[in-house]
Amino acid sequence: MIVFDLQCGNGHRFEGWFGSSSDFADQMARSLLACPTCDDLEIAKAPMAPAIGRKSNSAPHNVEDRRKGDATDQPTSPDVSNQPIPAELKEAFRKIAKAQTQALKTSSWVGDKFADEARSMHYGEKDEKPIHGRASPKEARDLMEEGVTVAPLLIPIAPPDELN
């Protein structure tokens, strides 16, 4: 699937989704493309920014900004809702983020060894201490079935070894 920004002769801009570049060219040649606003058949590709993916080793947000900020900072990601988020919900998210940030300050990152570490502490093989890391859904279910106390992080974090 390929997406093109298109523009009609009257200046209306819109998006067109095509199976390939040749599908676009074929539909253009057969006059199958029309402006959804004014039905103009004079359609051309509009200038568009290239879609360049993030490097696989880059953090989703500027790491320096994250270190300087705190949990009360507003997120910089685009809205994913077509309705404004109620103020009460924003405040609840802010409180959750702040509480999670505080909890992680006293917790140790154990990475993919989370299930093994949590199990070892539960059975007294290691001293208990707050930890966080990665666990698959199956590993988390297995831990809960064994009576090991686990809870998901409500706000995803970047593992320390993946930060730039």
Image (spheres, rainbow, N blue to C red):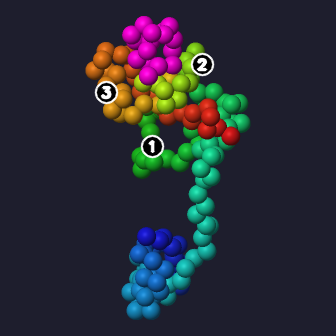
Relative to 123, is 2 above or below? below
Q: Quadrant of residue 123?
A: top left
Q: In this view of the protein, can residue 107 be seen by the observer?
A: yes
Q: Residue at x 45, y 77 (%)?
A: 20
Q: Which label lies toward us, 1 or 2?
A: 2
Q: Position of residue 95 (x, y in %)?
A: 50, 23
Q: Residue at x 36, y 16 (%)?
A: 148
Q: Position of residue 5 (x, y in %)?
A: 52, 72
Q: Which label lies toward us, 2 or 3?
A: 3
Q: Quadrant of the C terminus?
A: top right
Relative to 143, is 125 above or below? above
Question: Label 3: how many residues lie within 10 Å, few (<14), some (14-19) or many (20+)?
Answer: some
Question: Mark 2 touching mark 3, by CB under 8 A?
Answer: no
Q: Position of residue 46 (x, y in %)?
A: 57, 76
Q: Which label lies toward us, 3 or 1?
A: 3
SS of the residue under disc 3: helix
Residue furthest out toward the bottom = 30
Find the magenta span and give its range.
Answer: 116-131
Relative to 79, is 7 above or below? below
Callout 1 amino acid: Pro
Which is nearer the N-term, disc 2 or disc 3? Answer: 2
Disc 1 marks which residue? 84
Real-space CA distance between mark 1 and mark 2, rounded to the nearest whole angstrom: 32 Å
Relative to 26, is 156 above or below? above
Left or right position of 157 against 70: left
Disc 2 marks which residue? 105
Question: Label 2: how many residues lie within 10 Å, few (<14), some (14-19) or many (20+)?
Answer: few
Disc 3 marks which residue? 141
Residue furthest out toward the left = 145
SS of the residue under disc 1: loop
